Amino acid sequence: MNKKRYAGLMWTEKDKYDYMDTKGLETVRRDNCALVREVIQTSLDKIIIERNVPGAIDYVKSQIADLLQNKMDISRLVITKSLNKGAEYALGLGGKAEDYKVKQAHVELAARMRKRDAGSAPQMGDRVPYVIINAAKDAKTYEKAEDPIWVLENDIPIDFMWYLTNQLSKPLTRIFEPIIDNVDKKLLKGDHTRKIFKPTPKATKGSLMMFAKKKATCMGCKAGIEEGNLCEYCQPKEAEIYLDKLNCLKESELRYAYLWSEAQRIHGTLHTDIMCTGDGCACQFYRRKKVQADIRLAQEQVDKFGR
């Protein structure tokens, strides 16, 4: 690290440090997702305060593995940036073309959101939350930016490798390079990066999946079946499988009830609607959206047994 980027303990007494002081690092910058801030802060705590470098390395590897295996809450992947001068031209609100020479992810997303629903789209001065989704190999970053709510409601896959390469890689290298050799090989590559979540392809216009035929699968073992919900081997366990699906539904409903109660406590109301958004909201807005999607999916699974 250099003079513009550093981290250290502030001491005013000889017995105990006061706090960790950081400058120019991703722990204090707002142009990164929460995952980067959390990983960098925890790594610094383990390295500087706990003096536990192996523990910091193991922690980073576990976070990278969770990211690539789709085990991470989407709220940790949300990036927010404000619509400042220059965005007016892209949004069709006037402005000059020379004020917007380079396309930016949050501005292009705001323009697309205005086409979907101008009433709920971000306005000038608002902070626009977005995540990076899977797209064509040669797609630009501004083409891959998408509204987190739209992603959750439409089950759009996220580009996890983009986050590793463009969000985590450089900050982690800056911190660990003075401590360990071959940071890229030991920290950013290895066994923990070999298992990567691959979403099921969807039938989109112009894709090969348009020619694929859907086939029913057993709700127990996922084997292909011609009709019904269970294969001949799982039919004797129908009651057990039904109860398992029902428990999944109940667990999702309990998670939503917990998150809703937490939001009510934060807002100090038990009787009125909670009006909150994903930008900096402490009531786990995106988690509630995700659990709502889980409830819909679990309910569909349970309803199949009544057909």
Image: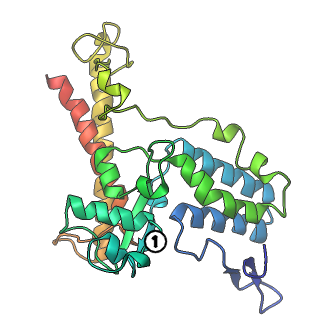
- Residue 101 spot, x, y in % from top left: 46, 71
Q: Is residue 203 visible?
A: yes
Residue holding disc 1: 101
Of all residues, the one furthest to the top in this rendering is: 232
As drawn, 58 above or below 190: below
- Residue 213 spot, x, y in % from top left: 29, 18
Secondary structure at badge 1 equals: loop
The quadrant in which residue 304 appears is: top left
Q: Residue at x 40, y 31 (%)?
A: 200
Q: Is residue 118 left or right of residue 167?
A: left
Q: Is residue 284 visible?
A: no
Of all residues, the one furthest to the bottom in this rendering is: 12
The quadrant in which residue 117 appears is: bottom left
Q: Is residue 116 left or right of residue 240?
A: left
Q: How many marks?
A: 1
Instruction: Name the amino acid type tagged 1.
Output: Lys
As drawn, 152 above or below 105: above
